[in-house]
Amino acid sequence: GGWQADGKGASIWDTFCHQQGRVFGDQNGDVSCNSCQLWDQDLACVRQLGLTHYRLSFSWARLLPDGSTGTVNPKVLQQGDHDDLLACNVSPMVTLYHFDLPQALQDQGGWAWPGIAGLFDSYAKFCFHMFGDRVWLWITINEPQVCAKLGHEDGLHAPGGKEPGLAAYLVGHNMLRAHAKAWRSYHSLYRAHSPYITENGFSQTGPVQTEDEQRAGFYRDTIAEVAKAIKEDGVDVRGYFAWSLMDNFEWADGYSVRFGLFHVDFADPKLPRTLYRSGREYAKITSTYKRDQRKEKI
């Protein structure tokens, strides 16, 4: 949501969505869940589930409209989603790049351009400097293989390139370079953190089923296996993040695919959030985990 609000620059997904035939039903992410204006409702959902951590993504084009640290958006720096989470004893995990490259950088060659790695590192260092005292868990680039192949070889994701045999490798290479630079910058300031499962879930399609037993069972079974890996095999998994808190804009699939623990009614201008059965089950799991943790400390 808020794709043009508060000084945000255009991203490649803004451009892609507004081209006919790119997204299911010609839908777009202009409003989506509208978390820009409904953040208090999102925070209530986080608290209702009893979460200890919450993963969110920064928009590069919202923080730095043209992609460079020479054009900082002061309005965004005044927002404090991560501060609100900390006030609720919820630790934020921030993804620096989640598919939405500033269009200004795409116009210079995007991820196929070697210079992008240095600009990403500058963006990352800017975020570490501005938010590093409150955000301790970071992800550099979300699903780089998806961006590289679907966005630059298959033409199914932004920026919509179709260059088989070359572009995906150039993009993947530069994403790895960008990740390495940001990783080194972070580790020159802070320490490494332990393994987390940062995105796991599966979708619902077709008519909405709020009593989604299959998805509820998926979470029960999956988290039980993660617990076994920790307790029986000694795997040092520090956290598990379900994808996702709410139904949202799922890229080229638009709103036809639903991953949320909360259903969002996109046909209603108020965008009400309704807890799925899978969400209720997930809340029970987090409650049990917290109870077990308290027992271990006694």
Image (spheres, grey):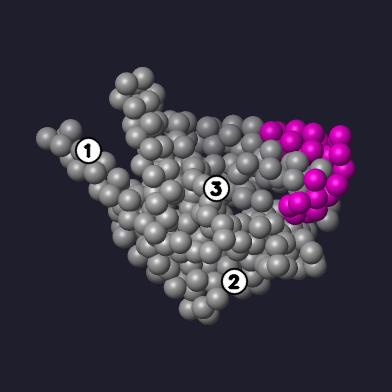
Stretch in magenta: 154-177
Quarter of the image where one finds residue 150: top right
Residue at 74% in and 36% down: 172
Seen in the picture, residue 261 relative to 200 is either above or below; the reply is below
Q: Secondary structure at mark 3?
A: strand
- Image position, residue 294 (x, y; %): 18, 40
Q: Quadrant of the N terminus?
A: bottom right
Residue at 38% in and 32% down: 226
Q: Secondary structure at mark 1?
A: helix
Q: Is residue 198 left or right of residue 23?
A: left
- Image position, residue 124 (x, y; %): 60, 45
Query: Which residue carries the number 2 mark?
Result: 31
Task: Find the residue positioned furthest to the left.
Answer: 298
Query: Which residue carries the number 3 mark?
Result: 95
Disc 1 residue type (three-letter): Gln
Disc 2 residue type (three-letter): Val
Q: Mark 3 against mark 1, which lies toward the viewer?
A: 1
Residue at 52% in and 55% down: 204
Q: Earlier in the sequence, mark 2 or mark 1?
A: 2
Q: Is residue 64 left or right of residue 137?
A: right
Tell me the CA gap for discs 3 and 1: 27 Å
**Residue 281 seen in the figure:** yes
For the residue carrying disc 1, how many other residues have a C-alpha within 10 Å: few (<14), some (14-19), or many (20+)? Answer: few
Camera-side residue: 280 or 163?
280
- Image position, residue 15 (x, y; %): 76, 64
- Image position, residue 240 (x, y; %): 41, 40
Residue at 46% in and 42% down: 137
Disc 3 residue type (three-letter): Thr
Query: Which residue carries the number 1 mark?
Result: 293
Quarter of the image where one finds residue 64: bottom right
- Number of numbered discs present? 3
Tell me the CA gap for discs 3 and 2: 20 Å
